[in-house]
Amino acid sequence: MSMIVSVHIRKSGGSSFRKELEKFYGNDLMLDYGDQIGSSHMSAKIRRLKSKINTFRKQAEIAANYKVIHGHFYATKYRCLPCEMRLVTFLRHPVERVLSNYYYLQRNPERKNRDAHVIHKLNHSLEQYIAHADARNVQNQFLDGDTLDNFSFVGITEKYVESIELYNIIFDACLGHNARENVNPRSSEGYNVSKDLYDMILDYNQIDYQLYLNALSIHQKNLIEFGLVSSVINKLNHPNFRGCD
C-alpha cells in the first residue's frame, strides 16, 4: 500500500492540480491546508507543530481512508504514515513564482495568514517583500531538507500539460489539464519587471533557482524515459486533443 503525498507549493500551479485531483480521486483525496509555510512567525510555527502532532496521532486513520494527500505542508510531514510515501510536487521559475505570490497577496487584503502580514500590515513594497526572509527560497522551504530524488513526480508549472501527462503515466491516472485555478490576471502576459528587479529576485532565491534547474533536468529525463517525445507533446497541445478515454 502506498500514499501519494502532493506538496502544493504556493503559486506553482497547485490549485489547478488540486481541481484535477479532486475530479479523479474524489473521496480518496485528503486536503491539508493551513500550515502557513513561508512564515517564520511564532504563531505559524506553533500551528505547524500542532498539525504535525495531530497527523502523528491520526496516522493509521489517514492511511486507511485516503490514497492521496494534497496541500500546503512540508514534504516531510507525512513520513510517520505506516505505508510507502510517493512524493509529488510542481516547481516554478522562482522569479515568476515570487512575483505571482506578491501580487496574489496584494490583491487579497482579507487574507489572514501570516505570510500576508508583510504586505497588509507592514505595507512592504515589492522590493521590500523580495528582500524579506520569509519570501526567499520558499520552494526549498516546502521541501524541508528533502531532495527531488525522493520525489516520484516533479511537475513544471511552465510545462503544465506535459507534466500532467507524465503524472498520468507514472500513477496510472487520468487527470485533465484544462483547469486553471487561482491564476493571477496579469500572469498570462508575464510580469514586466526591470532587469535590476529580476536580478534581485534571483539573488535572493539562488537555492530555488538551482532547485528549478534540477527539476527541469528531471522533467526532461522523464519525458524521454516514458516516451513523451516532441511529436507526442505537439499532439498533447493540439486543441482537439481529448486526453484520457
Image (cartoon, grey):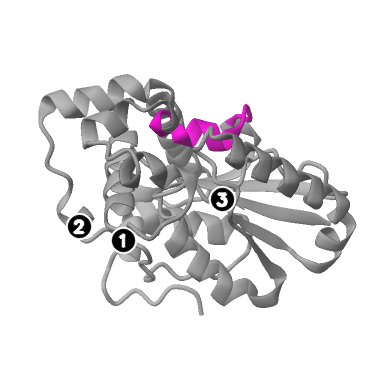
Q: Amino acid at mark 3?
A: His
Residue 77 in which image quadrant? top right
Badge 3 or badge 1: first in the primary sequence = 3
At 26% from the left and 73% from the top, the residue drawn is 239
Badge 3 or badge 2: first in the primary sequence = 3
Q: Does residue 38 belong to the magenta stretch?
A: no
**SS class, disc 2:** helix
CA gap, disc 1 and disc 2:
8 Å
Q: Amino acid at mark 1?
A: Val
Q: Residue furthest front?
A: 121
Left or right, residue 142 beside residue 107: right
CA gap, disc 3 and disc 1:
17 Å
Residue hosting label 3:
72
Residue 34 image position (x, y, % from top left): 58, 54
Circle 3/circle 2 CB separation < 8 Å: no
Residue hosting label 2:
188
Q: Does residue 137 belong to the magenta stretch?
A: yes
